[in-house]
Amino acid sequence: MKIVIFTSTRADSGIMAPIARELTNREEFEVHALVTGTHLSDSFGHTLERELSAWGPVVIHEVPMNQIEFSELGTAVALGNLQAELAGVIHALQPDLALVLGDRSEAVTFAFTCSILEVPIAHFHGGEISLGALDELHRHAITKLSSLHFPADESAVKRITQMGEQPDSIFFFGPLIADRMYADMSLTRETLAKNFSFSWAEKTAIVTMHGAKFDNPSTSEHLDALFNALDKIKNLNVIFTGPNSDPESQDLRTAILQYCSKQSSKAFFVESFGSGGYLRMLEICDVAIGNSSSLVHEAPFMGIPIVTLGSRQEGRGRSISAGIGPDPIAIERGIRAALEATGERAVVVFDGLAISTKIAEVIAATLPVTSKKIFWSDHEQPT
């Protein structure tokens, strides 16, 4: 059975890595990776080799978007290019199942192309809520295009059925990040600082800020307020990771680089640590700040205190309410409280059969599966 797995960013490739490895370890599966987006971009760290090395012996297909500019228009045009490229690759492969995670615009383009070509889809991390981002719309669109669903939390299961998906098509085994809750222990503090050109301080924060389409006030205003708050906290070094490629993120990137240049003794920019390196940073740093989904999914399991900003993760996972607004005083207070948190940090350890193993078993037992679906409503079920 032939399976294709889609990835466009370091975020989805890290979560999908254990699943890809599990599938490649099984003789019945021939696994192909369709790689695009920031993985192929020098401007965003060209993460293909580093990220896909953790996937096992998959057949890699580079699928270019040919994105010239990162405006809304430029992104829409690039997604059209991507669909044309994907159509050719998927048609040639004739896969039995397509795997896709999340909610990015590239992911919904992939899902739509698979739907047109009648390739059934297995969707990961569906049913979540993130009210401040355009991802919210994309995620639910992919759910409706998919035949199998592997949500990451129990609340998502209910939302997927509310969208008319058959309960027997939904499989929840726990948080998907459980299988990757390990850091690269070879990356010591000294090695990280040397490899990525930053320095540690008495306290060190890691910050990831992405553009949020529906942030009001804007994400840029939240970032400016964060800068002001950071300026008031002594003995704190800050490592900013690169924003994503969304149109709303480009002004953030410029502002972050300018801030790091201005505050070069305490603020540093690292485009990408890679999945294992980022987890190690979460394990070592004293606080994680920003609006990345990693603050909702990975950070709590690494035991690091978090400070969320804006509405990008509103409603998602454990983050039920919006983060702190663009108020420097409130942000400073939040960071100081996180830094002063006492007690031993506990990394969550998951026992039992790996989630990726359970997912592979479901896929093996379910295939072949059809793209044709019937809308499910609990009101129509016999009592």
Image (spheres, rainbow, N blue to C red):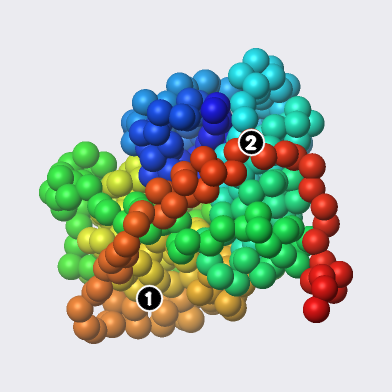
Quick one: which residue is furthest to the right in this view?
380
Q: Position of residue 3 (x, y in %)?
A: 55, 31
Task: State the quadrant of the N terminus.
Answer: top right
- Gap between marks 2 and 1 measured at Cα: 50 Å
Please state the horizontal and vertical placement of residue 216, each as a whole percent of the image.
Answer: 69, 68
Task: Please give left or right for residue 126 compared with residue 182 in the image.
Answer: right
Q: Which residue is mark 2?
A: 368
Q: Is residue 218 left or right of residue 347?
A: right
Which residue does the image show at 36% across and 33% down from the upper left?
25
- Provide the residue designation for mark 1: 335
Q: Which mark is residue 344?
A: none
Image location of residue 247, percent across then percent down: 65, 44
Image point (25%, 52%), residue name? 183
Work out whether residue 64 or residue 33 is closer to the camera in this orientation and state it. 33
Is residue 19 shown above or below 352?
above
Q: Closer to the camera, 54 or 223?
A: 54
| First reached walking from the N terminus: tag 2 or tag 1 | 1
Front-most of residues 243 and 144: 144
Residue that appears at 38% across and 76% down: 335
Q: Secondary structure at mark 2?
A: loop
Query: Is residue 63 positioned above or below 358 on the image?
Result: above
**In percent of the image, x 45 and y 56: which residue is there?**
176
Asked if the residue at tag 1 contacts the one at tag 2, i.e. Cβ–Cβ closer than 8 Å, the answer is no
Identify residue type, mark 2: Pro
